[in-house]
Each structure stands twice: as C-alpha cells, then as structure tokens.
Amino acid sequence: MLPDKEQIILVDENDIQVGAMEKLKTHGKGLLHRAFSIFVRNDKGECMLQKRALGKYHSGGLWSNTCCGHPRDGEDLESAAHRRLNEEMGLDCPLREVFTLTYQANLDHGLKENEFLHVLVGAYDNGPVLNPEEADDWKWIPEDELKKDIAKNPNNYTQWFGIILKKAEEKNIALT
C-alpha cells in the first residue's frame, strides 16, 4: 500500500480509536494518532539504530531507533510492530511494550507529529537486511556513546528519538 493512501488510526488522549485517515493527511493536519517505536538490543546491550532513507516522506537521512511505524486501520499494535520491523529491517524478534507517551513535533516538509506512542523493546544479535526505501544504514551503538553523540550532534537524530530517550531516562527504563 502506498504511504499516502495507508489509513492510520486516529485516537483520543486515552488511545481510544476515534477514526482513521490517510497517513500523509494525518501528518499534514497534525492529528493525534497511534504509533510505535521499537528499540532492538543485542546481548552486549547495544542498540540497533537505523539511518532513515533520504527518500522518506519526513526526517530522511537522520539516525533513529531501530524501527517506527503506525498500525493500519483494523490492525493490532503487535502485528503492526512485527510487520514494520520486517519491512524496514528485514528481521523479527519477540517484542514487549515498556511505556507509552504522547508528543508533538514539527517536521520537515510542513508535516507534524502528534502521536500516542507505544515504545517496544526486543532482543536480536544478528544484523538486519535493510529495505533501501526505508533505511540507508544501520549500526549497533552502546548507550554511553549514543548519549554523547546525541548531546554533541542533536540534528543528526530524529526528534522523537531524543524525546523517547529522555522519557525513558525519567522513568528509569533501559532502552539501549
């Protein structure tokens, strides 16, 4: 399904579905919608990052967590998370939700994020098989190195990535 035609789930502040709308229209209007972000760690405690493909509809060329996405209308969160992890990174692993948050951010191309975000973690020790339409690069990174680089080069990372890491630190939840 083309990204501009994909119907994603509009929600209220309690994550109750109130409708569905095409993904690009939702981001253009900045409407609250359901989303997820996945953090995959290896047995060394490193986090797998992806560099978003330059051709993405927003935030292209920026480093971010392993995978992000939106459940489609009629699709449950867990199925959507596994679908996107496979579509973007060519891998799958058990996932568990560690917390939720809502955030807003102004993006490039006049788009806006307004997400009720489910943050999921998983464990995997092999490398991904990148979908070039989704990701240009990837790497494993230790938490201390990641925090230093984000502090030094915040514009190299997606806005939501920093927001999630800050919230996890406040909640004393390890994502990397």
Image (cartoon, rainbow, N blue to C red):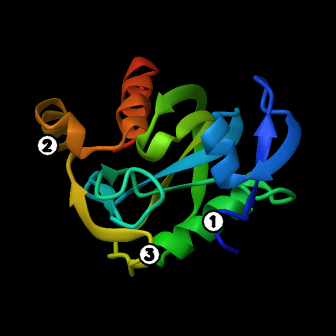
Foreground pick, 20 / 84 = 20
Residue at the spot of label 3: 133
Question: Dividing the picture into quarters, in which one does residue 152 lie?
Answer: top left
Residue 147 position (above or below residue 128): above
**Looking at the image, which residue is at 29% across and 52% down?**
63
Assign the C terminus to one quadrant of the image: top left
Q: Position of residue 36 (x, y in %)?
A: 59, 47
Left or right: 92 in relation to 55 = right
Q: Is residue 92 visible?
A: no
Q: Is residue 150 left or right of residue 106?
A: left
User: What's the mark number on residue 3?
Assistant: 1
Q: Indicate the secondary structure of the residue bearing disc 1.
A: loop
Q: Residue type at mark 2?
A: Glu
Mark 2 and mark 1: Cα distance apart in space: 33 Å
Q: Nearer the viewer, residue 65 or 135?
A: 135
Report which residue position mark 2 lands on.
Answer: 145
Identify the element where label 3 is drawn. Answer: loop
Disc with the residue nearer the chain's start (2 vs 1): 1
Count of residue discs: 3
Identified at 29% across, 58% down, the residue is: 61
Q: Quadrant location of the N terminus?
A: bottom right
One can see residue 106 in this view: yes
Distance, label 3 to label 1, CA atoms, is 11 Å
Residue 108 as seen in the image, left or right of residue 71: left
Q: Secondary structure at mark 2?
A: helix
